Image: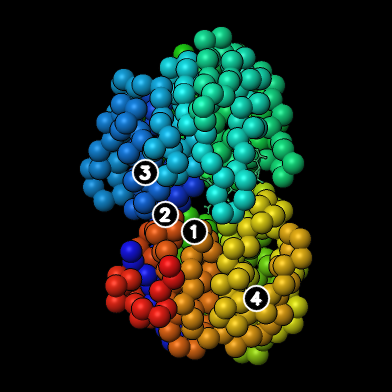
Amino acid sequence: MDVFRVTGNGPLRGKVAVSGAKNAALPLLAASLLSADPVRLRNVPDLSDIRFMIEIMRHIGAKVIQTEPGIWEIHAQELTHIAPYELVRKMRASVCLLGPLVARLRKAEISIPGGCVIGPRPIDLHLKGLRKLNCKVSIDRGYVHVDAAKIEGSPIFLGGRNGSTVTGTANIIMASTLAPGQTRIECAACEPEIIDLCHMLVKMGAQIEGIGSPELTVTGVDTLNGCTHSVIADRIEAGTFIAAAAITRGDVTVTGIAPKLLSAFLDTLEEAGLPIELGADFIRILPYTGSLQPVDLITLPHPGFPTDLQAQLCALMTQIEGLSIITERIYPNRFMHVPELQRMGAEIAIEGPSAIITGASQLSGAPVMASDLRASAALVLAALAATGDTWIQRIYHLDRGYDQFEQKLSAIGGHIERLSDTVMPKELLAE
Ligand code: EPU
C-alpha cells in the first residue's frame, strides 16, 4: 500500500488549479443514465471514487468511454436494474443510481450501502421520497427493492434530523424528472453540486423550477435527451488548498473557483484575520504576520460551513493561539482525525459533537493513520506545519477524492512523497 511522507517545509507559494468536483461528478454520471442518447461529461476529476462509479455503471449495462483526459461519454441504451453489494460497498455514493434506475426502468434493486467511519449514513429519506412518489419500496437481504410501475409526482418534505440530504435530493430530483405529474420537493439540499445536477438535467430536457432554493418543482417529461456538460469546480478541494496555504503562512492563489461557492468558509477565515484577495474565479491567500484569531463555528448544510472542510479547519486551528470550538452538526462523530492530530502534538478535546482546540501547538512529525477522505487531508495539512517527517498510512482514502493531490501540493512547494509502505521504517508501520 502507498503512504505519504510529508516534511514541513515553510510557506507554500504559487498557483494551484482546482479540478472538477467529486460530489458533482458522481450524481452527474448517474444522471447520464436517464437518457438513451449519449451524454458527454467534461472536467471529470481522476479519482478512485469516479472509477468505482464507472465500474458499477458498466456493470448495469452502460457504455462509458473516456475520449480524452477528463472527458467521458456515456451511452445508456440498455440497462439492467440491479447494483450488487460487491460493487456498491466500495462506494456509498453509488446509491445515487437509485433515482435514474427508478425513472428509466421503473424498478431498481440496489445493495444498501453501509455506514462509514464518519458515522451512520442512513438512506431513510431517499426511501421516504420514493414512497411519496408512489413507489413500492422494500428491504430484503441488504438490498432495497423499488417497484416504480405506478410512479407519480407528489409533494415531498425531504428534511431530516440533520437538515436536508444531498444525495437524497439528487435521487428524488432524478426519479421525478420522468414521473408523470408534478413533484414539489421541500427542504431540498441547496449545495452547488445539486444546482449543477439541475442545470445538466435541464439541458437534457427536464423541467425544474426553483433551482438553488430549498423548494424545487419538477414536472415530469416523457424522455430526456443527451447533452454535454462540464462538472463544476471542487469547492472542497479549493478549501483544502486554502487551509494548506494558511497553515504554512503561504502565498497561494487557488484558481478556477468562484469565491461564492465557499462563502461560509472564507467568512470564517476572514473573521480569523486571514488576508484573502478574491477575484471572479480565484482566491488568493496572502501571508500574515502575528497570529490569527480562534474561531467558534458549526457545520451546517449549504450555505453554512461545510462538514467536508471541518477536519482541515481543525488542523489549521491547532496553529492559532487561543481556544477554537468546532461543532459538527451533520456528522456528530466525524472526528477521527482528532486522535491522529493529538499524536502530532495538537491539544484537542472532544465534548459531544464539538472539538475544543487549544492553540497554538508545536506539531511534530509522527506516523499517523488516515481514516477517511477529509481526515487524510487534515493530516497532510498538520504535517506541513510540523517539524520533521510525518508518515501517513492508508492514503487510499485521500485518492478517493483528491485529483493529483501530491503533484499539486509539490508544485506550490510542499514536500510530499508517495512511497510504498515497504520503504517505511518497520517500527513506524501500523499492523
Ligand atoms: N441523513 C438521514 N437520512 C437520509 C440521508 C441523510 O438522516 O436518508 C442524514 C445523514 O446522516 C447526515 C445528514 O442527513 O447527518 C446529511 O447527509 P447527506 O445525505 O446530505 O449526505 P450524503 O448525500 O450521503 C454528501 C457528500 C458528503 C458530504 C455530505 C454532507 C456526496 C457523494 N457525498 O453525502 O461528502 O459530507 O453530503 O454535505 O455528495 C466527502 O466528500 O468527503 C463526503 C463525505
* Element marked by disc 3: helix
* Element marked by disc 2: loop
The type of residue carrying mark 1 is Leu
From the Cβ of disc 2, is ligand 1 less than 8 Å away? yes
Which residue was labeled with disc 3? 52
Q: Are marks 2 and 1 in contact (CB under 8 Å)?
A: yes
* Up-down relation of residue 360 to residue 236 (above or below): below
From the Cβ of disc 4, is ligand 1 less than 8 Å away? no
Q: Are marks 3 and 2 in contact (CB under 8 Å)?
A: no
* Element marked by disc 1: helix
Mark positioned earlier in the residue sequence (3 or 2):
3
* Element marked by disc 4: helix
Q: Residue furthest top?
A: 150
Q: CA distance from mark 3 to mark 2?
A: 9 Å
Mark positioned earlier in the residue sequence (4 or 3):
3
Mark positioned earlier in the residue sequence (4 or 1):
4
Residue 136 appears in the rendering: yes
> Would residue 294 be found to the left or right of residue 231 on screen?
right
Residue 373 is labelled as 1
